[in-house]
Image (cartoon, rainbow, N blue to C red):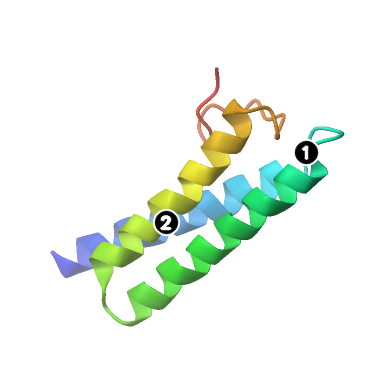
Amino acid sequence: MESEIKKRIDKYQKLTSHALTKATKSIIKGKEREARDIIEMVENYLSDSKYFKEKRDFLNAFAAINYAHGWLDCGVKIGVFNVKDHTLFTIK
């Protein structure tokens, strides 16, 4: 079971890192300040997820990666990022 949890955490860490890269390249003009705040939160939660995984605290690692991705989806929903990839983001 632990192996499966690690695989899922790895999968979502990679997915969120990829989504972060796309979002960073898709900031809507005039929304740079908001984007910077969101990107900082995503990076912090990604880092937290990796830290918790190393400490074998898989519950918090999974929670942190979900918060990270939630911040990205929020940025898309409120019009900070202009992305079209529905496999990485919740698109309107």
User: On residue 27, which mark appears?
Assistant: 1
Between 20 and 3, the one lying in front of the other is 20
- Amino acid at circle 1: Ile
* Residue 74 shown left or right of residue 66 in the figure: right
Tell me residue 35's x, y (percent): 72, 45
Local crowd at mark 2 within 10 Å, few (<14), some, or many (≥20)? many
Please, which residue is most extreme toward the left here?
A: 1
Q: Which residue is mark 2?
A: 65
- Residue appearing at x 59%, y 62% in the figure: 43
Local crowd at mark 1 within 10 Å, few (<14), some, or many (≥20)? many
User: On residue 59, which mark appears?
Assistant: none
* Residue 57 shown left or right of residue 91 in the figure: left
CB-based contact (under 8 Å), mark 1 and mark 2? no
Tell me residue 4's x, y (percent): 22, 60
Please, which residue is most extreme toward the bottom here?
A: 55
Residue 6 visible somewhere in the drawing:
no
Question: At numbered mark 1, what does the secondary structure look like: helix, strand or loop?
Answer: loop
The C terminus, quarter of image: top right
- Residue appearing at x 42%, y 77% in the figure: 51
Residue 10 visible somewhere in the drawing:
yes
- Residue appearing at x 26%, y 74% in the figure: 57
Question: At numbered mark 2, what does the secondary structure look like: helix, strand or loop?
Answer: helix
* Residue 40 shown left or right of residue 44 in the figure: right
Please, which residue is most extreme toward the right here?
A: 29
- Amino acid at circle 2: Ile
The N terminus, quarter of image: bottom left
Sequence-first tag of 1 and 2: 1
User: Residues under labels 1 and 2: Cα distance?
Assistant: 21 Å
- Residue appearing at x 86%, y 33% in the figure: 29
